[in-house]
Amino acid sequence: VSPRRSLGPANADDSRDSVPVLMCALAQGLTWARAALLLLLLGGWVDALPHAVGAASFVTSWVVTPFAYLYHEAVGVGYGWGASGVVSRAAEAAAVLALLAVLLHGILSLLSTMLPPTLLNLSGMAA
């Protein structure tokens, strides 16, 4: 996070961008912490990775980072139902993220029906 963020925004446009920057910093910090723990695991300094670190890293990488980007790009269309400012931008970003999740689920469902079952059967590879 730059010193400008810690000293305060110079104008209103800078204050709109501080939330996504901080969310991305959190996501990147947790992802690099997981990578550092993996190196400690491979070096033999820790016995096992905590499950919470892996889950937090996954959530921040696949939910918080896209939400931060969508929040940054949102214009706040929620004003029609009374929301304004941060709430309308967050509602717009959450709605777009949910639509992207539905789209991804649909694409994966179509692929699973199009691919032959032998490609999808991974239980025989475990033995």
Image: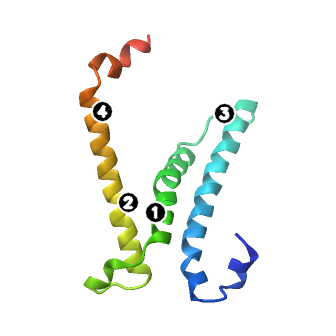
Question: Which of the two discs, 1 and 3, labels the residue nearer the N terminus?
Answer: 3
Query: Which numbered disc flags the more N-terminal residue, 4 or 2?
Result: 2
- Identify the residue position indicated by label 1 in the image: 67
Q: How crowded is mark 4: few (under 14 residues within 10 Å), some or many (20 or more)?
A: few
Quarter location, residue 18: bottom right
Q: For the residue carrying disc 1, how many other residues have a C-alpha within 10 Å: few (<14), some (14-19), or many (20+)?
A: many
Residues under numbered marks 1 and 2 in contact, where contact means CB atoms less than 8 Å apart: yes
Whether residues under marks 1 and 4 lie with C-beta atoms below 8 angstroms apart, the answer is no
Q: How crowded is mark 3: few (under 14 residues within 10 Å), some or many (20 or more)?
A: few
Decide if residue 6 is on the left or right side of residue 85.
Answer: right
What is the x, y in percent for residue 3? 75, 76
Q: In which quadrant of the rendered image does the N terminus lie?
A: bottom right
- Residue assigned mark 4: 111
Task: Name the outermost residue toward the bottom.
Answer: 11
Circle 2: is it few (<14), some (14-19), or many (20+) Cα within 10 Å?
A: some
In 3D space, how far apart are the residues under numbered discs 1 and 4 (Cα atoms)? Answer: 26 Å
Kind of residue sitting beneath label 2: Leu
The residue pinned by badge 3 equals: 47
Of discs 1 and 3, which sits in the foreground? 1
Q: Where is residue 113 in the image (x, y as percent from the top left)?
A: 24, 29
Q: Residue at x 34, y 19 (%)?
A: 119
Question: What colour scheme governs how the chains and residues are painted in the rendered image of this protein?
Answer: rainbow
State how far apart marks 1 and 3 are (Cα).
34 Å
Give the vertical position of 39 relative to 74 (above or below).
above
The image position of residue 7, as x and y in percent, is 72, 84
Which quadrant would residue 127 be assigned to in this image? top left
Q: Are marks 1 and 3 in contact (CB under 8 Å)?
A: no
Q: What element carries label 3?
A: loop
